[in-house]
Amino acid sequence: MPGSEDIIPIPDGTITSPQGFSAGGVFIGLKTRGEDKLDLAMLVSDAPCSIGGVFTTSAIRSATVDLDRERVARGQASALIVNAGIANTCVGPQGYKDAEEMTRLAAEQLGLTAEDVLVCSTGVIGVELPMSLIRSGITQIELNAAGGNELARAMMTTDTHPKETAVSFTASTGQTITIGGVAKGSGMIHPNMATMLSFAATDGAVDPGFLQTTVKAVADETYNMLTVDGDSSTNDTFLAFANGQAGNPTIDDRSPDADLFRRALHQVCSNLTRMLARDGEGATRLITVEVDGARSDNDARRAALTIAGSNLVKSAVYGADPNWGRLMMALGRSGAEAVEEKVDLFVNGVCIMEAGTPIPFHRDAVVALMSSEQVDFRISLNLSDGAATAYGCDLTEQYVIINSAYTT
């Protein structure tokens, strides 16, 4: 089996790093906060794409989610239009009409049919889109092969910086295949798909059914293991486009490149997940929670996410307080099987508990370790071979400040 060394990071990579993709963005006045004022963008492929997608499971959702779910079911798309500042959620039937119009306008600009275009929105809930601004703005977008950064910036709401990454690998038949991605999200992050917007693109030829299955599996292992504040969005969307411009034989579940493609997409999404967690609203520290030895992978995921999402754990990390009892509390209420006498617990590599018994440690040294930009917890349950990693961030006063005046 190929190793991780076969997946090559691309410096300054983005969603337009793969062949045949271009993007661009403009400012039309939808955003009311932040210094980076791009707020409307498009992504387009030179060739039709296989498409895979996963979406929020919230019963209250954006019209864009409903429209995209219908179109993704076709298995093919060529472009995407996205706006920030307004979520197009809870605005009645007009929301779906506006989402449809956005795809029609983009299609006219690109020489496509509306069914070939997907649409995403993010921002304040309960506000109608100012379609006159969007109609004018679409005609102003200048697409180019270096435009991935403009797309990443135009998606931002309370994000402090754009999130983008890309990797490449060599197919068994010799072609270089590139996968790039972008994401946005800072608050209302507790994906249940998918809390955020994320888009990936590859120049590999990929079977639509295989792509959909892979997108779902990768989302479960990355985005769905991310939590900032325990609140899932109405607009969560993860889309992946594959245009085949690399010229490789189509990858499906029987292909010799299937596993390598899965792992490359996983690397892209894992990179973006870490960026999202590190940029949580008001966050000062990235938290990773690795659980191993669980009775099952599902148990490991349940335990890791519960610990990463605990307000008490998050507050302790903010204060660099090695109060490891909070981790045990969260583990106990997670629903995962745990036997206290078997648990080993590590904080940034320092063993705090072994076989359920506390281990003396140098408190000041652990406080110093927890004062770094990343705090890693590892919990070994020693019951079986289930494993998972969750990602989160600390809870600070700034989170409350941001969200207490979000629309004022």
Image: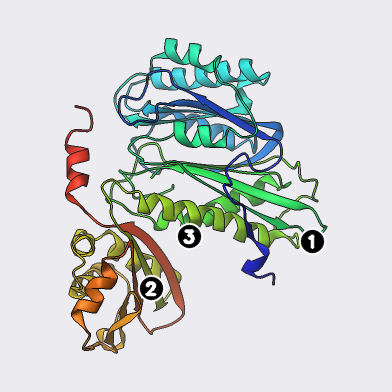
Mark 3 lies on residue: 221
Query: Marks 1 and 3: which is nearer the front?
Result: 1
* Image quadrant containing the C terminus: top left
Q: Residue 278 at x, y = what percent?
A: 36, 53
Q: Please tell me in which quadrant of the rendered image residue 256 appears.
A: bottom right
Pinpoint residue 248: horizontal percent, then vertical percent. 79, 50
Amino acid identity at mark 1: Ser
Query: Which residue type carries mark 3?
Result: Glu
Say above or below: 296 vs 319.
below
- Dot 3 falls on a residue whose secondary structure is helix
Farthest right residue in view: 173
Q: Which residue does the image show at 55% across and 22% down from the upper left? A: 103
- Mark 1 and mark 3: Cα distance apart in space: 26 Å
Q: What secondary structure is found at the residue carrying circle 1?
A: loop
Mark 2 closeness class: few <14, some 14–19, many ≥20 residues within 10 Å: many
Name the mark on residue 172.
Answer: 1
Q: Is 35 placed above or below 305 here?
A: above
Q: Quadrant of the N terminus?
A: bottom right
Residue 32 at x, y percent in the picture: 31, 24
Left or right: 244 in relation to 122: right
Asked whether residue 119 is in view, the answer is yes
Report, in whole angstroms, how far the alpha carbon at label 1 lies from the one at label 2.
34 Å
Mark toward the start of the polypeptide (2 vs 3): 3
Numbered marks: total:
3
Which comes before the other along the chain, label 1 or label 2? 1
Check disc 2 and give the amino acid type: Val
Pick the residue in front: 294 or 33.
33
Q: Is residue 384 left or right of residue 338?
A: right
Q: Is residue 238 left or right of residue 115?
A: left
Residue 299: % across, % down: 38, 70
Residue at position x 71%, y 51% from top?
Answer: 177
Q: In this figure, which residue is indicated by the disc labeled 2?
A: 291
